[in-house]
Image (tube, helix red, strand yellow):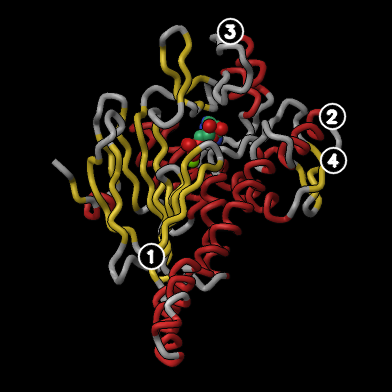
Amino acid sequence: MISILQACCSTRSSLNWLSVGLVCALLLAACSSPRDHTLDFLALGTEVSVSLYAVSEGQAEDASEQLQSYFARVGLDWYPWNPGELRAINIAIELQESADVSPRLAAVIRRAAQIERLSDNRFNAGLGRVTERWGLHALGDEPPRLPHSNEIAKLLAQAMGVASVRWIDDQIVGAPPGLMLDLGGIAKGAILEDSVQILQNLEINNAIINIGGDLTVIGDVNGRPANIGIRSPVEESAIASVDIVAGETVVTSGDYERFIEIDGKRYSHILNPRTGHPVEHTSAVTVIHTDAMLADAAATALMVGGSEEFEHLTKALELEFALLIDASGDLRLTPSMDLRLNWID
Ligand code: AMP
Ligand code: MG
């Protein structure tokens, strides 16, 4: 924009002042008139892509600045292996001390506890120590080694979920000392919710916020719903597409997304809280819901429950739209999801 204005003003000598003013005003109007923008950045160990429809330069700049600083903050505060709030809470639990929790993080932890209960603990946001032992977050330089089943059993005995945390207002006053909060299964949902709020505060009414394939739609895409591809668990291509309308979130959990390799075998980053072992029976789950935190946590819970528990869990979690692909490629769908998907041959 600046270069266009300079070019415009350097032609002054050959035009009269009125026409210069008119041309500059027209160029300015063209530059500041609403248009589509895409903001791409890396955060939370993944690619974030935010599409903004019909917004001004100023709105796009503010959105970029505010979203990136928000993502940087939650990347520290909500990831238990970074030096931030959640790590401080986990240290306090280990030392059996009380911990003050900021209101937003307290709300996320409480929501996680509700979903643990509704999912019969298939979703369990207290598996941090087990996750750590498996090396699922690849923290150290050492290659991960297969844990002994006694080690896992010992860690699992204290991983009773965030529902076992005792609160006084927004202060955690008690929890099993071996409990380590890991909100990795629900955090993206909460971050999508907060990102919607940030954009709406900037009066951005049409956008898609996409965090590594999990996304929320605000408004529409130039008058139409967002048409989203659902990825095949075995290759990069889409197996189906679906229209996502205003306020909906679509989340996919899959064993291809994040995994580790031990002795040449791939292990999913999603653990079965009953066994402490990575899930092997499910390849991918997609959930669509207007509640982003529920969509995220439910996708993780359905990965754990597998085909066998699909019907029970989708009812218990009140999921209208869910799809599960098991390890042998067989599908399970809720009836409404079946009606909604457009399969790609
Ligand atoms: P997602 O990609 O949403 O399925 O979340 C996976 C992340 O959640 C993992 O990387 C772990 O940090 C954490 N996690 C693993 N297993 C579970 C589980 N059964 N319940 C809740 N969180 C889990
Ligand atoms: Mg999840």
Give amino acid for label 2: Leu
Question: Which numbered disc flags the more N-terminal residue, 4 or 1?
Answer: 1
Question: Which numbered disc flags the more N-terminal residue, 1 or 3?
Answer: 1
Question: Which numbered disc flags the more N-terminal residue, 3 or 4?
Answer: 4
Question: Which numbered disc flags the more N-terminal residue, 2 or 1?
Answer: 1
Q: Taking 107 as reference, is 168 left or right?
A: right
Residue highlighted by disc 3: 148
The disc label shown at residue 153, or none = none
Q: Is residue 177 visible?
A: yes
Badge 2 crowding class, 10 Å Cα cut-off, few under 14, some 14 to 19, many 20 or more, is few
Residue highlighted by disc 4: 98
How far is the residue under mark 3 from the one under mark 2? Answer: 26 Å
* CB at disc 4 and ligand 1 closer than 8 Å: no
Counting from the top left corner in percent of width and height, residue 46 is at 49, 39
Give amino acid for label 1: Asp
Residue highlighted by disc 1: 36
Residue highlighted by disc 2: 95
